[in-house]
Image: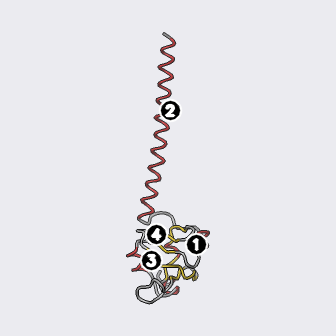
């Protein structure tokens, strides 16, 4: 009888351990999902100074919605100057580096969607600085 009782206890422990492991996986995946949503709506943390320093000419600049906003011409203080090549109005556009969410090898992701980016970009680095 003791042998059956030990088997039942062992089985109970295995079930509890499996349930605990599953709970940890669910919690981890839920955290990842929350971070993904924050990233998509621009609520995540901004890029680090090291990431900003990694921004180079020719990198694609993407809005949070995935729309390509242009190419980096160069960094100008705390702003990114976009090239004229993709400009629909023939003007340079500047976006503050505070809008940068993250930087990958060949592209910059902004925390703003394309409409907010277009509404907020400026014609000069000085105009970005004075935006308040």
Estimate the spatial distance between the alpha carbons at disc 2 and disc 4, rounded to whole Å.
Answer: 40 Å
Spatial CA distance of label 3 from label 4 is 12 Å
Camera-side residue: 2 or 106? Answer: 106
Q: Secondary structure at mark 1?
A: helix
* Location of residue 86 in the rendering, given as x and y in whole percent from the top left corner: 45, 83
Residue position marked by numbered label 2 in the rendering: 17
Q: Give how far apart the Cα atoms at labels 2 and 3 are.
A: 49 Å
Front residue of 11/78: it is: 11
Residue on which the image places disc 4 = 111
SS at badge 4: loop
Is mark 2 in CB contact (under 8 Å) with mark 3?
A: no
Residue at mark 3: 69
The residue that appears at 57% across and 79% down in the rendered structure is 57
Relative image position of residue 95 (x, y in whole percent)? 49, 79
Residue 104 is labelled as none
Q: Height in image: 78 above or below 91?
A: above
Residue that appears at 46% across and 46% down: 27
Question: What is the CA distance from the residue labelled 4 to the residue labelled 1?
Answer: 13 Å
Query: Is label 2 in a helix, a strand or a loop?
Result: helix
Helix, strand or loop at mark 3: strand
Mark number displayed over residue 52 = 1
Q: CA distance from mark 1 to mark 2?
A: 44 Å
Residue 35 % position (x, y)? 46, 57
């Amino acid at each position: 009888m003791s042998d059956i009782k030990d088997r039942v206890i062992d089985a109970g422990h295995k079930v509890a351990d499996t349930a605990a492991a599953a709970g940890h996986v669910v919690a981890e995946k839920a955290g990842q999902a929350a971070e993904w949503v924050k990233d998509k709506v621009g609520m995540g943390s901004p890029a680090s100074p090291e990431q900003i320093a990694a921004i180079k000419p020719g990198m694609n600049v993407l809005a949070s919605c995935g729309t390509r906003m242009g190419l980096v011409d160069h960094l100008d203080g705390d702003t990114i100057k976009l090239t004229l090549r993709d400009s629909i109005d023939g003007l340079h556009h500047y976006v503050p580096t505070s809008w940068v969410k993250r930087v990958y090898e060949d592209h910059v992701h902004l925390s703003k969607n394309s409409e907010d980016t277009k509404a907020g970009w400026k014609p000069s680095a000085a105009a970005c600085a004075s935006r308040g």
